[in-house]
Every structure is written in structure tokens, then in C-alpha cells.
Amino acid sequence: VVVATGGGLTTYRCPVGTKVGFVCGGGKQGSYSQYVTMNAITEIFPMPDDVPIEDCASFMVNPYTAVGILDTAQQAGSTKAIVHTAAASQVGQMLNKLAPMQDMEIINVVRREEQKKLLEELGAKHIVVTSGEEEVWKKELKDLVKELGATCAFDAVAGDMTGHLLDVMPIKGSVYLYGGLAGKAGNINPSDLIYRKKQLKSFYLTSWIKSGGSYQMVKRMMSAGNHVNSGLGQGGWCCSQFEDVSMEKAHQSIVQALDSSITGKKLRIRFD
């Protein structure tokens, strides 16, 4: 909650008493502090009044990444559909809920059948499982790319997957790397880049937020904030399921979570 401001136009979004989330950008203060001083434009995010503030604990990285991915695709001309790998992740689940609101389709790429089932339960229509024969799933993926008109893919896996995605993209299509679960990107056919004019790019949330200068950044974040805040409540497109733990039991709970599937739930450390 905002307890004091420096005044001026930069603080109009967050007057005293506003419930906010914040991002520590400078590294001088942390979120365990009782009080922190933040930049009102770039580090403070007003939270919805109708959602308990503790339920907004994961408001930033995954929800804004989902918004940023769709915005990046639309700006690049892929307004109908995108390909997304590691699609059963939190970001992937959020994309499948958010995309229909923007009349876009997600072509989901996952490794296992149980991940496909999870996405189907969320209403996902297009899911490619890569555990079978490479020739078969790549043809399925390429056919979906052509059918739905996808010209962008967003890859959180890297490794050989990056080359596979470039291969199935249409001429002048783009693959955006934003993760490296499988290590260094590879398996790339030079002809895709040289003759077919396909592009390998990066997506980095901070760069997306800051692109275009201060004026564009403010506009972008106000729009993104409206999208995110509308979905933070229970049942919303970017709501999170939390498991509450105390600080004393946090280490034990983290170790247990790492030994299991943690895709569907987040640990939330409470101090009350």
C-alpha cells in the first residue's frame, strides 16, 4: 500500500492508499523490506480493488509475459495465431485463456500426453505432442501453422526445438527465443535464414516494456495493466493457485516442490 509519494504528475496513478505491486529494479531494496521506495512510473503497478492483495502476489512476470508475447506477435503481423513451446507452463496456460479474448489461436507444443490433457481441460484446441516420431509431429505442426496462418513462434525450450520451429515457419516467419530449457539453440538450417528470409529473434520482458521510449512505455503498461488486473481474480485468465507456507517451512516446501510437478501451483511465503 502506498504510504507517501513525491507528488507531481508521475504519481497520479498511485496516490496514498493505493494497493500496488512493485518490481525492485535497482537492487538496493528488496521485497522483504517493510518499506521500499520505488519509481512511480516504471516500478509501481496499481492492483485491482476487488482482489485481495495477497492473491496478486504473482502479478508480474507470467501475466505480463503473456500480454507481451501476443502484442509482439501482433506487431509483427501474426494476428491470427502463434506457436508456443513448453505450452503447459504457467505462461502457456495463461496464453490459452488470453488469446481467445484477442481473437487469436495458440498452437501448443508439449512433450507429454498428460500435458496435452491439462491444456485440453483449459479449452485449448491445437496441441502437438513431440514424444512420438519426429517426422509425424513436425508434419502435424507444419500443417497447423499453414492452416491457422501463424507467422511467429515463441520458444521457451531452445536446443533442437529452435531449428524445428524455423523449419515449419512460412517464408519470412520468425521464431522468438525467450527461454533455454534444453540449452543452447541449434539444429538450424542456414537456408531458412539466408534464402527463406526467416528470422531468429529474442523476446525479453524488460525490453518489451521499455521499447519505444518513455511515452510508449507508459501507454503500453497502462494497457497491459488493464489486461492483467482484469484477470487476477479467482477464475481469471491470469489468476494463480497458491500454497501458503511460513518462512520457517519455506526451504522444506521449495525442496518438495522441485521434486514434483510445480506447473499448476506457486508457493507463497506469508509473514502474518
Image: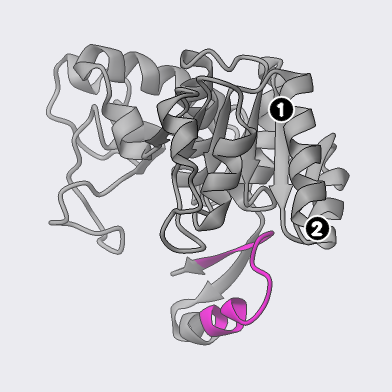
- Amino acid at pointer 1: Val
> Which one is nearer the viewer's eye here, 4 or 94?
94
Give neighbour class at mark 1: few <14, some 14-19, many 20+ (Cα, 10 Å).
many
Question: Residue 230 lies in what quarter of the image?
Answer: top right
Residue at left offset 68%, top offset 71%:
261
Q: Secondary structure at mark 2?
A: loop
User: Residue 66's image quarter?
Assistant: top right
Q: Position of residue 226 (x, y in %)?
A: 51, 22
Q: Which region shows up in magenta?
A: 253-268
Residue found 25% across the figure and 49% down from its top: 24
- The quadrant the N terminus occupies is top left
Q: What is the C-alpha distance between the residues marked 2 and 1?
A: 19 Å
The residue that label 2 is drawn on is 133
Q: Are marks 2 and 1 in contact (CB under 8 Å)?
A: no
Which residue occupies the foreground of this view, 226 or 270? 226
Q: Secondary structure at mark 1?
A: helix
